[in-house]
Amino acid sequence: MNEVGKVTWDLVDAVASDAMRLCDEGLALPINADKDLAPAPDGTPASKDFGDLLVSECFIPQIVYSTTFGYRTDKVKSKPTSVCDVFDLEKVPGKRSLEKKPINNFEWALLCDGVAPDKIYDVMGAKGGVERALKKLGTIKDQVIWWTKGAQTPQLLADGEVVMGSTYNGRLFSVIEEEKQPIGMLWDWQVFDLDGWIIPKGTKNLDAVKKFVRFATDTQRLADQAKFISYGPARKSSAPMVGKHAKLGIDMKPHMPTDPKNAKNTLLFNYEFWADHQDDFTERFEAWLAK
Amino acid sequence: MAKLPPYLSTPERLWHYGFRVLCALIFFFLIFPLVVVVPLSFNAVPFFTFTKEMLALDPAGYSLKWYENFFSNLNWQGAVRNSVIIAFFATLLSTTLGTLAALGLSRPNMPAKTLVMSLLISPMIVPLIISAAGMFFFYSRIGLQGTHLGVILAHAALGTPFVVITVTATLVGFDNSLIRASASLGASPTTTFFKVIVPLILPGVISGALFAFITSFDEVVVVLFVGSFRQRTIPWQMFSGIREHISPTILAVATILVIVSVALLVAVELLRRRGERLRGIQET
Amino acid sequence: MAGATQQNGDVLVTADGTPLRISLARALRRQKIRALFLVAPLFLFIVITFFVPIVDMLFRSVENSIVSEVLPKSTKLLVEWDANGNALPPEAVFAAMVEDIREGRKNRTITRVGQRLNYETPGMSSLFRSSGRKVKRIKSGPYKSALLKANKKWGDIETWKLIKQFSTNYTSGYFLAAVDAKKKPDGEIVRVDEDARIYIELFKRTLKLSIIITMMTLILGFPIAYLMAILPTRTSNLLLIFVLLPFWTSLLVRTTAWIALLQQQGVINEFLVFAGIVHTDSRPQMIHNQFGSIVAMTHILLPFMVLPLFSVMKTIPKSYVRAAVSLGAHPWLAFWKVYFPNTVPGIGAGAILVFILAIGYYITPELVGGTEGTFISNRIAYHISGSLNWGLGAALGVILLGIVIALYLLYDKIVGIDNMKLG
């Protein structure tokens, strides 16, 4: 909230796209990965350890998460196997929950309308692309409950309000493994995104903040966070250290979105494309919703 | 209920009872939602419905864990503290300013009375989202966004119309000759104020203060924009709770708040009656 | 008056010899000042904490200095450029743009221009962002080809027309967007594409739902206000508690209660299934739609209808209807011709109050309205805290505020603001 001239926070948890924007606008502090962040235990510098995930000079990645689908194992007519089953009301009848924004939904709609995975953004950005995506979404529109917060789909699934719905994979993990709800994961065409820290410009406790960040994002800490929720650590060196869940004692590796079995078909959130089109597409999406 | 006169025809009798049944249903509609949250807040499972065990009055179906959660959770306890602090200071501010203004407005010689009155009441009329957005931008610029003081000032502004209205209403029946009588007996204006005016308008002031208190205590839109996590109030916490993760703790909080509102209602009602008695207005 | 004064020539004077007229005027002025003195603290308080912020926000709906502030050199040169011709701006403009972008990159303001222009034409955000990154590689001219190499959109005349169009300090752009219209670079105002129209629809829906809610509160409020008015005071005071309790209960408590009642697995649906009225797989959808908004808001606003109705009905003498009936009117006719017209001020007061409150509602529609049951306020909140398109949020706010003020004046005309009562 520095934009209106005031810094309320010392450290902010942000998704990659927000971090990039805040960095561009000079509201977040650029960091020097090798200087400010801890090297891997074997001495690999942080910039190498995080690799491509350092998407912005202000962004300190923590986790890789994905947006994907969960379904009620006891309420679906047949088990969904492909993301396109979301659009198939005959195979999986019943309400589904989708996020109330065009991002991800447009990608899945075009994919299931027969667009090749590597052509999705070309088609979406071209004339008629949005119409095509909305037309595909229109086939299930009256069966969709739109969510705005990540906790809604798990709640809707647990309450039986929907038979399937999209949300962040970690939330589904909690509701399946911790709350023992009859819910299954559909990993097909999950969309990867990153979450991490940014340091707002103007913070008064810079030294303490940097000390904390250095500690909180070292190899062990990032691996430890996977003891609680199934989000992939952003460091390569943390991956082999992912172990068992702190309370349940189950192996966390097969629950990671990056596990090869889960990551057969994946998309990566396209920051550049959505930075340009988010405003416009959201307006058209909202107009479509209102009709 | 009064006995029906014997001369009524059958349709008239039917209408008499039919109308009362209709009204009973409407009263039911008004009160049922408030009543229903009470038993649900004792639910043993994290859902918003009556379970079979609950309906069978099986003790296993009931639990106090949502209350326990409310009283042990630091987020909720912080919210209670913030709500009370903010509402207290906002009430103090709006009651003081509002009462003074009402005294001024009730003077027979107040110029541009209607215009001033309508401006002072406007915080009650302007949609909250507009007030909240405006305050968000402006308070941020002067460094009040995300501070308790900012939220208190904002809530005081929202609460003053209620004080102005209730105190002005009390002053409608005010007999100005009492002031002259007091003065003619040698009392200074200050003495007159505290010994004559204050006791007479006190019920109006207190009931206005209660309105101002509940306005702040209930308010969520402005807190969402002007406040930050540090200023989270009970409604703030409830709102984000409902949007994020809807647990029966919210119903436990709701039950507590219903009890608080019953207490406030009783207080206002007693004050109103006392005020009418003091001013010698007959109950009709 | 004559008692305190004496006839002295042809003017009345007070005991100390001042003419009475002047003395009275002086006393009056003193009283006026004293009254103003009492009102002043609150007045100032409201002006500073409430009016200034709102007026400040309203300016955001037309304020547009960002483009000319961040791109000062190029926008100045663009004034000379003929946007209606078919030629790209001259080399000097490109050179100025490179300088502006370089400066904007340094101050980290360049992406904000992109963001601002992106509201008008998608693609501007990435144009400025990528140019900002590449501009440091441009060491020397010719700048035109260098910029075109950085991003080919610089070769599109529409880009330049857009920058020229929005380099003014004030814009009608946000207001036009708020009514689903836009201004083309040549000044012509057109409606936006059919599939992007949303705000007119949303305003219409807000009005429609507010009218329905007002009607519902009237339909439900009239009978109970009437019942309370005809019952003895002791009984009606008891019934009044049923109206006042919801009035005093937190808005969020009532909204939460309706979520518990209306949701798919909620109390009402469970009951319907239990009673065998509906099958468990075909539970009616009662929340996250217009129905949810209407029901919850009718409940929340009902006291605001009942209380003014009741206070008016209390004052209608019962003898009116009795007189009409004794003169031979059917009870229905007596009610309709004699009683009902007397309640109209109460209906007017209640209806306008409920309508004003409904039209600006935010919290309840946000939680139970889903997509089709949301109001214009939800959209304003979205632009203030979600999309960060503050200008558009402010423009929508101005329009909503205009409607509310008009209604407020109407209320003042019908009821009089000084007659407003609570509880």
Image (cartoon, coloured by chain):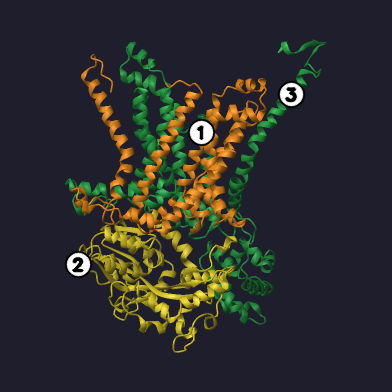
Chain colours: A yellow, B orange, C green
Position of B183 relative to A168 (above/below): above
Question: Which callout, 1 or 3, points at the residue further toward the start of the chain?
Answer: 3
Mark identifier at residue A78: 2
SS class, disc 2 = loop
Residue tagged 1: C411
- Of C79 and B3, nearer the camera is B3
Looking at the image, which residue is at 23% across and 14% down? Answer: B6
SS class, disc 3 = helix
Looking at the image, which residue is at 46% across and 30% down? Answer: B272
- Of A39 and C216, nearer the camera is A39
Mark identifier at residue C25: 3
x and y percent of residue C268 in the render? Answer: 25, 46
Q: Return the chain for callout 3.
A: C
- A257 with respect to C75 (left or right): left
Q: Residue furthest right?
A: C9
SS class, disc 1 = helix
Position of the C terminus of chain C, as image quadrant, is top left
Give the spatial CA distance, label 1 vs label 3.
34 Å
x and y percent of residue A237 in the render? Answer: 41, 84
Mark identifier at residue C37: none
| Crowd band around label 2 with a 10 angstrom C-alpha radius: few (<14), some (14–19), many (20+) | few
Q: Return the chain for callout 2.
A: A
| Crowd band around label 3 with a 10 angstrom C-alpha radius: few (<14), some (14–19), many (20+) | few
